[in-house]
Image (cartoon, grey):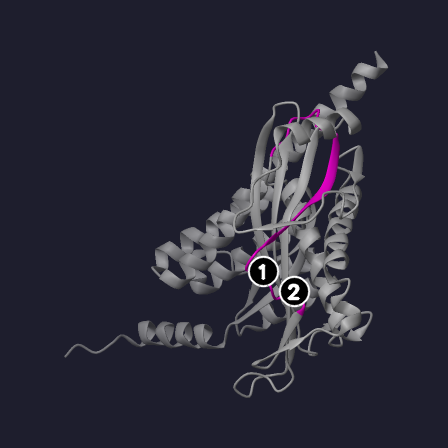
Amino acid sequence: MEKAKPKLFMILIITLFISSCTIYREFPIEVYQPSELQFPDDAKDIVILSHNFKFDQDTFQNYYKRNKKLLRLPENISQSIDSMMVTKVLNSLSKSLKINGSFEDIKLLPYNFIEQSKGEFISTLSKDFIKKLDAHYNTDLVVSLETFSYFYSEYPYGVEKSIAYNQVLTAATWAVYSPDKELLLDIKTMVDTVFWDGSTTDKKRGRIRKPPIAEALQTAAQVAGENYARRLSPGWQNVYRMYVIPPVEDFKDAARHFEQEKLDKAIALWDKYNGQRFGKLSIWANYNIALAKELQGNIDAAKQAIEKSLLQAIALKNSEDIKTVSLYNSVLQKRVYDISILSEKENNLDKFFEGFQE
């Protein structure tokens, strides 16, 4: 039996030690996200309303669940629950679109503009109705909340000895109509879950409490409106990236600099491990450098660093590392695409204003 060479054996031991003691930590950053739906550049005015439709089987709006028991909502909530929730989600959508500045004029119609209807199946708004809206409001787009369902649950004793929590489940179906083209441009159902377990903290408010029923329902409706707004308009959003801290003092020092936003100091420490001779450390050094460069707004340098990281991971034939690095590589490629869309829109806007100056 051939004996392993001491040097090779030590490299194996160090690699296993690094793998077992490596820390993966999330870090929030703000990135530009284009809208999921692409509208004509001249689509500047929209009308927002509720179709006010309820499915026959949607009979739980006046109930909530406490552990496994179904209970009626308090009367002061159940009497106005639907108007409260629909109004909240529509207001949230309108407010989010105004903040993003994607449209010049946003008209928000009352939740009961259309009389409530029920049925087994939902039909879209008629062409004649859309034409009448356009004739009255002169709009480019009509956004309709076709139907909105929600359900509140609380588990004061947890589930199977887990932490106690409250949650609201919402399901909203939205449609976008073009009066000019007489077309249904998009229909989308979005499901959101908002929960509170009393363990979440906020830097300004400290520990976030579990809200009472009405407040929890309205918060969930607000979130549903905000989430759909992201489908309609571009904007800056908080996302989480991951950086890696192997059990090496330089990486620990770099992490401290990174958290304090002293990015150049962090990059200088990571760059010491840039070469292939550092093996697995080189993967994470370049990976972290890519994240720092992204935070600095240097996407080209970030791409170069993550490509180095990926090549090293492939060379070491570690499938898990390849997957992790490839995922961030894909994220950066999408950011390049998103930034190109933003640049194109900015160029179009510059040409628009140049036309006025002429």
Where does the image place residue 234, in percent across and percent down from the top left? Answer: 68, 41
Residue at horizontal 62 percent and vertical 87 percent from the top: 157
- In depth, the one of 268 and 310 nearer the eye is 310
Provide residue 276's location: percent of width, then percent of height.
Answer: 43, 57
Which residue sits furthest left?
1
Q: Amino acid at mark 1?
A: Asp
Residue 309 image position (x, y, % from top left)? 47, 54
Residue found at x 37% / y 72%: 11
**Placement of the N terminus among the 4 image quadrants:** bottom left
Q: Looking at the image, is 186 positioned above or below residue 40?
A: below
Toward the viewer: 219 or 182? 182
Which residue is labeled 1 in the image?
A: 58
- Quadrant hosting residue 205: bottom right
Q: Which residue is mark 2?
A: 61
Give how far across and how far down residue 98 sits, in percent: 79, 42
Pick out the residue farthest to the right.
Answer: 357
Residue 224 is covered by the magenta coloring: no
Q: Nearer the viewer, residue 238 or 326?
A: 238
- Amino acid of disc 2: Gln
Say what secondary structure mark 2 lies in.
loop
- Bounds of the magenta span? 38-62
Left or right relative to 213: residue 40: left
Q: Is residue 324 above or below residue 298?
A: below
Q: Would residue 49 be counted in the magenta stretch?
A: yes
The structure residue drawn at horizontal position 72% and vertical position 54%, both measured from the top left corner, is 86
Report the Cα–Cα distance between label 1 and label 2.
7 Å
